[in-house]
Image: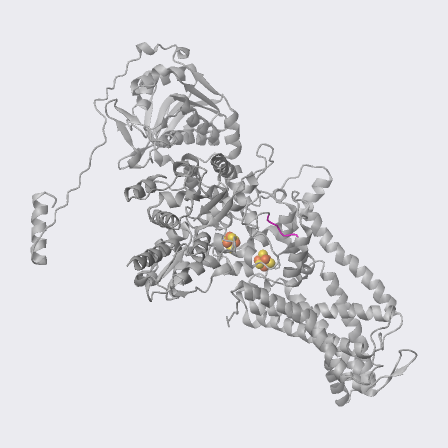
């Protein structure tokens, strides 16, 4: 029977936005989208799709679904994954969910994944490159009641198990988990593939299925954020320059050393 | 032994071509005729007996043989033509008069040959010598069988002209043999197939036997005043003999050494048959080996790509993919994805090595050689072509075992090309290398998604952000805001201005290039030019996407710009990036975007000529020689070489030229999307070029392209000769701004 892999993807503000263009609304505690700079698919998530495609390259009979939650513009991220080679795309677009934190997001995605069952593997990026929290993957596993392996650099499916090479601070480790499972992938896995033009054209024609919370049997009123953003601001960096004066070079060096010691820099 | 004489100036080259044409076509017969008339008083009867000493039936035999040989000759090109038809359709019959004119200049006139003076002269001698001998033979047949006109002065002049032609051809062949065996010129790397080598020796043998036959005839008839079988028998005259100088010398030597009549007769007769066999063999060969370039090369020159927008080379504007929905394949992966003309190109190449000798990729140790990849495809076409044709004839599905892109022609070969056009500029047969390489890139990118990592990153970047400069901290309006803070208001284009100044991604997003952009804007404002910019509404012109093989992305980007231009009423565009300039000028019309484009150096040269900008000597550069680097896309692809130099001259700068300049310029390494693609191996192209610039003794490298600027800036930091001298790299506009600012200061003082 065909293996079914579900990849969760997110659209994020371009991480390469020039710093001068990056603004936040401190009162509303929100990021103001930079004008003229289009959002992009979160890079770790496309690496997740790459991992799924590699499993399909190895096994052949694999169906890959892509799930995302967000406004209509998130369609672009889904289309990009379809162009890479994924089979179907699903977007949960519900205005009531646009302020969702990781907890609500995970609940909605879990509901969508269950709706897409049977499934064998869920792959997410290790973290989204906007807020960099890295918790949706593990929370999903918790909610689905299945094992979770994080920060993978290689994912294989063998004999009904998933074999994952994980990145550690000082090396790698290989772990196995029974299917179904959640795996989050890291950039060590490799670059996501470049879509072939035929697939881009095919993806452009493919329909993305759109669901609301109600379609998933959820009531947005009962989904409460658990994360409270206390404050949002761009940290200020200050540079102070002090000239060390002195009559001779030796004197200047001595004073410099003294200052550095005082500042506990040496 | 590596002395190579090269003619750099295009005017001089054309002059040489014209001169040689004149010398060969008009001068040789003219001189012969004048000499004859002056010196041959009283030889009104002079003529020769055709088929002297040869059996009567030989005449019939020769005609029959000629007919047979012509059939054999014709079969060669026809069999190749069948192979080319494996390719797709392509129209190459437009504008026949222009083609004819072009053919006269570059086919018969051999306008590209003086690029390499030794080889050019050698070829010229062989070509014209041989042509005269051939025409002479046909004339003789006409004389013998139809109208007897080779008599008296006409005959003597004829005889002299043919002997001179024979000498010219012999000298040419000896030059070729010398180049091949003693000089061992590197261009001969692939030019020594048995076919190429045997050809030379055969031609030498034909010439030498011809002279000996003539010598024997002269010795047996004219020198002895013997009666010849013409008009029922007339007496020949020893005074005629010197009009066949080589024959005269040989005949005289034979007589003086006491050769017997019988020996001379035998030698004459046997060599006559040998000569006939070799000459007819040669004619048959013209249908097949390297020598077939007489026919195929000529045809190739006639069939070259003609540009509707005046692009200089076939690779200047890449052909568009007309319909993505119905295209069987994107780009060229297999033989049948090329057009018939592309396959013909491959077949026509004579392995002269000119392209390779100028290719920046090959000359820095990369896998790519333009001559080599053509030969690889040719070999495969010859081997697999007939099989494919047979399958097609049987109506079977045509399966090609090997892909061209990535297999017959390697991945690195395809990706090494910087589209500089040196190969196309040099090729005497007008073979079109770049479109083939780019079609293969298209296949690799759009069908296979197979490309170097850096190329992939660039394409992703272009797709997502509309510009190729990953990680830039600038936006397209940063420089405008900065100028505003200096009190310079940059006009936004709203349709009321004459020009749109197209800044380009590099001009807006790279700090170093922003300085050039600002200089240009200040100069335009100062000269009172009516212009505006698009600011945030600009997006990439599409050149990098197209040359990195993503035609789809190119068309989207180009279309978007064309729409913006049309909506805003743009008619004239100023571009300082030669790549944008080239794309807007030659490639936008393919998508129905027709705008007049000028390069900033052109416009500034005009403004200086009109007195609207007044440059003066730049004091701080006094005594610092400047060398100007011709950008490939300006000089070679668009023939713009004079204006930047005029500007430097107007600034009274001391200039020195690099060895490779104007049309022969050597790429900085950034063309064809290579600004963002890692070089596969070997030396870095920009380092080689920077070293060349440093070698001129110049202290400043003047450029006219944002990529060249980047490449040289990196180069002068890394190449020791340049770093030691503290070389500076400046755009011509930056120099001009300093010069004009100085002149203003001087005027107000
Ligand atoms: S365009 Fe330039 S780099 Fe490409 S093959 Fe020709 S000479 Fe070489
Ligand atoms: S492509 Fe042209 S220049 Fe290059 S080897 Fe062939 S004939 Fe010579």
In the picture, measured across the screen, residue B69 lies left or right of residue B15, that is: right
Specify the farthest residue to the front: B748
Q: Quadrant of ligand 2?
A: bottom right
Instruction: Tell me the residue at 45%/65% (across/down).
Output: B659
Between residue B520 and residue A26, name the one nearer to us: B520
Magenta stretch, overall SS:
loop
Residue B123 lies in the magenta stretch: no
In the picture, measured across the screen, residue B194 lies left or right of residue B235, that is: left
Specify the farthest residue to the right: B232
Between residue A55 and residue B165, name the one nearer to us: B165
Residue A92, x across and y down, in percent: 40, 18
Q: Can residue B580 be seen in this view?
A: yes
Residue B173, x across and y down, in percent: 64, 71
In the picture, measured across the screen, residue B162 lies left or right of residue B686, that is: right
Instruction: Tell me the residue at 46%/18% (across/down).
Output: A209
Which image quarter: residue A93?
top left
Asked if B624 appears above or below A83 in the picture, the reply is below
Between residue B11 and residue B524, name the one nearer to us: B524
Magenta stretch bounds: B303-307
């Amino acid at each position: 029977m065909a293996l079914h892999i579900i990849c969760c993807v997110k659209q994020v503000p371009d991480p390469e936005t020039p710093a001068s263009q990056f603004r936040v609304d401190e009162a509303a505690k929100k990021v103001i989208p930079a004008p003229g700079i289009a959002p992009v698919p979160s890079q770790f998530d496309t690496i997740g799709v790459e991992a799924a495609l590699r499993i399909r390259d190895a096994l052949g009979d694999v169906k890959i679904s892509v799930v995302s939650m967000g406004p209509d513009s998130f369609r672009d991220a889904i289309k990009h994954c379809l162009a890479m080679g994924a089979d179907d795309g699903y977007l949960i677009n519900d205005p009531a969910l646009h302020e969702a934190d990781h907890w609500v997001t995970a609940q909605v995605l879990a509901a969508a994944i269950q709706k897409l069952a049977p499934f064998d593997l869920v792959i997410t990026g290790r973290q989204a490159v906007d807020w960099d929290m890295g918790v949706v993957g593990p929370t999903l596993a918790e909610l689905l009641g299945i094992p979770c392996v994080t920060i993978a650099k290689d994912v294989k499916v063998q004999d009904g198990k998933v074999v994952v090479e994980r990145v550690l601070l000082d090396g790698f480790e290989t772990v196995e988990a029974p299917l179904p499972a959640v795996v989050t992938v890291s950039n060590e896995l490799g670059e996501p593939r470049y879509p072939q033009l035929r697939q881009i054209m095919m993806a452009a024609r493919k329909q993305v299925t759109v669901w609301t919370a109600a379609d998933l049997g959820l009531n947005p009123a009962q989904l409460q954020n658990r994360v409270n953003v206390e404050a949002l601001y761009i940290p200020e960096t200050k540079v102070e320059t002090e000239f060390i004066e002195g009559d001779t070079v030796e004197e200047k060096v001595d004073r410099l050393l003294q200052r550095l010691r005082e500042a506990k820099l040496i | 032994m590596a002395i190579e004489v090269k003619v750099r100036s295009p005017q001089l080259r054309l002059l040489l071509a014209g001169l040689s044409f004149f010398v060969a076509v008009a001068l040789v017969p003219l001189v012969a005729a004048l000499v004859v008339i002056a010196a041959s008083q009283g030889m009104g009867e002079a003529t020769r007996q055709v088929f002297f000493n040869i059996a009567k039936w030989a005449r019939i035999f020769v005609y029959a043989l000629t007919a047979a040989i012509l059939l054999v000759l014709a079969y060669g090109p026809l069999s190749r033509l069948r192979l080319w038809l494996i390719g797709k359709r392509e129209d190459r019959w437009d504008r026949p008069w222009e083609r004819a004119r072009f053919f006269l200049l570059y086919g018969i006139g051999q306008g590209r040959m003086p690029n390499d003076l030794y080889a050019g002269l050698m070829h010229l001698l062989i070509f014209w010598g041989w042509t005269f001998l051939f025409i002479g033979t046909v004339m003789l047949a006409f004389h013998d069988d139809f109208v007897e006109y080779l008599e008296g002065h006409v005959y003597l002049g004829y005889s002299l002209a043919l002997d001179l032609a024979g000498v010219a051809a012999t000298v040419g062949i000896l030059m070729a043999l010398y180049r091949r065996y003693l000089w061992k010129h590197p261009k001969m790397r692939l030019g020594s197939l048995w076919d190429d080598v045997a050809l030379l020796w055969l031609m030498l043998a034909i010439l030498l036997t011809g002279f000996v036959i003539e010598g024997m005839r002269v010795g047996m008839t004219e020198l002895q005043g013997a009666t010849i079988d013409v008009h029922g028998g007339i007496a020949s005259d020893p005074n005629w003999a010197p009009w066949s100088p080589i024959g005269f010398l040989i005949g005289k030597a034979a007589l003086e050494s006491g050769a017997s009549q019988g020996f001379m007769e035998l030698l004459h007769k046997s060599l006559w048959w040998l000569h006939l066999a070799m000459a007819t063999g040669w004619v048959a060969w013209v249908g097949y080996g390297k020598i077939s370039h007489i026919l195929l090369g000529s045809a190739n020159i006639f069939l070259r790509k003609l540009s509707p927008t005046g692009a200089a080379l076939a690779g200047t504007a890449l052909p568009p993919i007309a319909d993505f929905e119905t295209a069987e394949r994107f780009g060229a992966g297999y033989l049948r994805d090329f057009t018939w003309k592309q396959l013909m190109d491959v077949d026509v190449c004579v392995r002269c090595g000119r392209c390779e000798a100028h290719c920046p990729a090959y000359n820095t140790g990369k896998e790519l050689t333009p001559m080599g990849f053509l030969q690889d495809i040719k070999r495969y076409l010859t081997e697999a072509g007939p099989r494919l044709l047979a399958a097609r004839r049987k109506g079977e599905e045509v399966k090609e075992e090997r892909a061209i892109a990535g297999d017959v022609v390697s991945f690195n070969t395809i990706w090494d090309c910087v589209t500089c056009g040196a190969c196309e500029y040099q090729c005497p047969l007008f073979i079109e290398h770049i479109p083939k390489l780019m079609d293969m890139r298209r296949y690799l990118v759009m069908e296979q998604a197979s490309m170097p990592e850096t190329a992939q990153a660039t394409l992703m970047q272009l797709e997502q952000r509309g510009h190729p400069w990953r990680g830039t901290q600038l936006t397209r309006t940063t420089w405008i805001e900065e100028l505003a803070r200096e009190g310079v208001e940059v006009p936004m284009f709203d349709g009321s201005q004459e020009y749109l100044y197209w800044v380009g991604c590099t001009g807006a997003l790279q700090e170093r290039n922003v300085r050039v952009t600002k200089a240009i804007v200040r100069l335009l404002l100062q000269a009172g030019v009516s212009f505006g910019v698009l600011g945030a509404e600009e997006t990439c012109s599409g050149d990098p996407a197209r040359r990195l093989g993503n035609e789809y992305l190119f068309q989207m980007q180009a279309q978007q710009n064309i729409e913006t231009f049309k909506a805003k009423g743009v008619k004239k565009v100023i571009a300082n990036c030669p790549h944008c300039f080239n794309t807007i000028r030659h490639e936008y019309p393919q998508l129905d975007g027709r705008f007049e484009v000028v390069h900033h150096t052109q416009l500034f040269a005009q403004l200086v000529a009109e007195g609207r900008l007044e440059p003066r000597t730049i004091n701080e550069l006094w005594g610092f020689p400047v060398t100007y680097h011709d950008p490939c896309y300006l000089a070679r692809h668009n023939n713009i070489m004079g204006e930047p130099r005029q500007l430097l001259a107007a600034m009274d700068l001391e200039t020195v030229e690099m060895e490779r300049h104007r049309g022969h310029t050597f790429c900085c390494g950034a063309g064809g999307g290579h600004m963002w693609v890692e070089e596969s191996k070997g030396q870095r192209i920009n380092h080689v070029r920077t070293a060349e610039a440093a070698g001129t003794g110049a202290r400043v490298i003047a450029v006219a392209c944002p990529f060249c600027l980047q490449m040289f800036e990196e180069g002068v930091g890394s190449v020791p000769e340049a770093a030691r001298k503290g070389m500076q790299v400046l755009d011509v506009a930056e120099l001009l701004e300093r010069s004009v600012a100085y002149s203003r200061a001087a005027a107000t003082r």
